[in-house]
Amino acid sequence: MLRKQDLPATLFFAITIISAATLIVPLWNYTQYYSALYNFNYTIQGITVNTSQLSARMAQINFTLVATNPTPYSGLQVGPAQCEIDFFGSIHPDTNGQPTTYWELTKLYNTTTCPIGPNSNLTIPFGTTINPDNTKLSSDQYAAFQEFMNYLTSLDPKGEITLVLICHLGLQSFMVSLDILPVGGNPFMQDIPLSQSTT
Amino acid sequence: MLNAFLSGSQTVGYTFWSISTAVPLLLLFLVSVLAGMLLADIRSIVLGIFEALALTILLTYTGIALPLLVGNAPSLYANAIPETAIHDVFSMFFPLIPFSFLIGALMGGFLEDWLF
């Protein structure tokens, strides 16, 4: 039989046991925290340049940002991302074969914050239409779009375009580049699957 | 300083009046009341507060440094974790937690005299 005097001791004991028990799972999860920070990474996958509407002066650039949490840590979030698409263009390469012009095409934003579970991937699709006839473009963007369109439509076998994607997520930044090379008759009338390298 | 305190200043490492700070603080206060009721006399209460504070700091430090202690932290973080742990422990603990220990335990001591 529990006496009135034993009530504080019993309560104290119960609180100690319950709080210790409720801490076990979060503490175990926390032991993976730094490992998750270290192993967490981003890649860009599936970059395509769709030029099927080139006759209408439109091209679409799509890619997917993939965040990977390879650890059992639960509680990571992928914050807002910003990706900048630039291009180096060269219709007639100079003697060293270096790109002769550089333009910033556009910036894309993903403003949502998404949780990423343990041992899982999170994909964030990005896409934009390059259309210099869009009336809402700034003068700089218009010039860049116009230039990109000119390169796409007039590219000869000696020329090349390199798309450069620079993505910023929190403190992390990384860059992916993609060469669009003319191969054969009409290389731009289909989606171009791209191999990419990340740094 | 009072304005900063009342508006939820973050100068000591956390917001004073957010729910996430107030609830654990309230629970600590209630546990301190219970501990004060168990210890009963003032000498034991004052000694108990210092012992409890030292033990709590040790446990919290161990908890924060746990990834390093169990070997799950990459070597990149080996120096940062202990420093972060010390900083977090002291910025979280002072001044509210010792204060809630003290007031709670003293209240518990008086409550014990009054109830039993």
Image: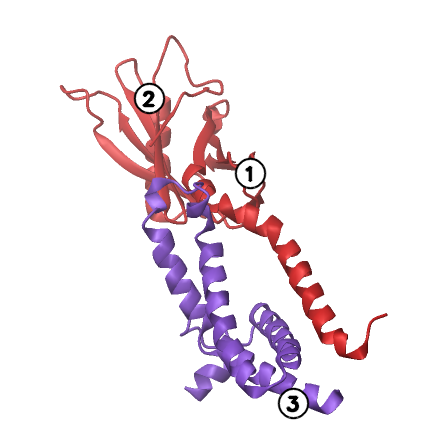
Chain colours: A red, B purple
Q: Which residue is rendered at x = 44% and y = 31% of the image?
A: A44
In this picture, residue B44 sits left or right of residue A37:
right
On the question of residue A152 being in view, the answer is yes
Task: Tell me whether marks 3 and 1 sit on the same chain.
Answer: no
**Residue under label 3:** B110
Which quarter of the figure is the C terminus of chain A placed in? top left
Q: Quadrant of residue A141?
A: top left
Viewer-proximal residue, B30 or A32? B30
Three-letter amino acid code of the residue under disc 1: Pro
Residue A31 drawn at (x, y percent): 50, 46
Tell me which residue sits at (39%, 9%) in the image. Answer: A185
Residue A131 lies, in percent from the top left, at 45, 36
- Element class at badge 1: loop
The secondary structure type at the circle numbered 2 is helix
The residue under label 1 is A72
Q: Secondary structure at mark 3?
A: helix
Q: Earlier in the sequence, mark 2 or mark 1?
A: 1
Mark 3 residue crowding within 10 angstroms, few (<14) / some (14–19) / many (20+): some
